[in-house]
Image (cartoon, rainbow, N blue to C red):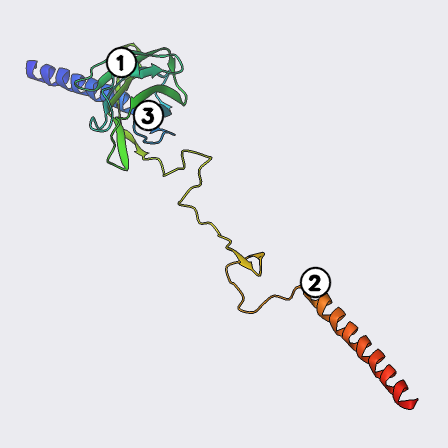
Amino acid sequence: MKRSLKNLISLVILFSVICMIGTVNAASTSMSLTSDSKLIAGNTVTVILKITNIDAGEGIDALKGTLNYDKNIFEDVTIESFEGINRWSIMDYNPQTGIFTAIRSPKVNMQSDVLKVTLKAKNAITVNSSIVEIKDITVSGGAVEVGGTGDIVVQPVNVTINKVSEINPDPEKPNTNEQTNSVTTNKINGNEVKGNNVPNTKLPQTGEEYGIVFTIAVVAIISIIAYIRYRNVNIK
């Protein structure tokens, strides 16, 4: 009898644990990490952590995660590098471990931005890109016993920061990378001719043509007059 009672109690406890686990696992959420920044030596990079989906009853009000970044590319991050968004407040950040915590009041149950992290690139960069990651993410909507969600494990999120493309820093100076069409100016008989090809023959000049025609006409008139006078002299 006592053994049967113990077995019954064990079954009840096991059933309660299974129900509790089922309640915790029923809640879920997902996140994303985005950035519009480019990797430029000496400049800052901003990443935004966002809740993209919440299925957690009344919502969540606590967040814990680990910031992971390349310390050869970025300077050390401090708690001042974090900024809470949409009523989220940054409570703690450990530079050695990268672990941070944040809370919100009231609970959030809809898609929204959570926090912003600003990282400063070092003055010397030898890579074309770098990954910023937030891992070991856990969110919570309170203890299960009081109607909360318990701890909800979220998949790690990351974003790749690419190095900025080569640009022309001085707008007054031409960009040597751009293709340009050059026009060669050549002088032909004292006149400038634009083009890449120089003709081998002399270009006709309008003034010269008129001069030649006028000279021929004068010579022809003089010849006719001389011929008429010569003929009249012979007739006499």
Q: Are marks 1 and 2 in contact (CB under 8 Å)?
A: no
Q: Quadrant of residue 218?
A: bottom right
- Label 3 or label 1, whichever comes before in sequence order: 3
Local crowd size for mark 3, using a 10 Å CA cut-off: few (<14), some (14–19), many (≥20): some
Q: What residue is at 30 percent from the left and 25 percent from the top?
A: 42
- For disc 1, the marked residue is 79
- Kind of residue at badge 1: Ile
Q: Position of residue 11 (x, y in %)?
A: 15, 20
Q: Position of residue 200 (x, y in %)?
A: 53, 68
Q: Nearer the viewer, residue 230 or 116?
A: 230
Is residue 168 left or right of 142 when viewed as pictured?
A: right
State the separation of the CA atoms marked 1 and 2. 84 Å
3 or 1: mark nearer the eye: 3
Image quarter where the C terminus lies is bottom right
State the separation of the CA atoms marked 3 and 2. 66 Å
Q: Position of residue 150 (x, y in %)?
A: 26, 16
- For disc 3, the marked residue is 43
| Number of numbered tags placed on the structure image | 3
Helix, strand or loop at label 2? It is helix
- Label 1 or label 2, whichever comes before in sequence order: 1
Q: Position of residue 72 (x, y in %)?
A: 20, 28
Q: Quadrant of residue 18?
A: top left
Is residue 200 left or right of 210 when viewed as pictured?
A: left
Q: Are marks 3 and 1 in contact (CB under 8 Å)?
A: no
- For disc 2, the marked residue is 207
Q: Nearer the viewer, residue 60 or 88?
A: 88
Q: What residue is at 39 percent from the left and 21 percent from the top?
A: 113
Q: Nearer the viewer, residue 189 or 129?
A: 189
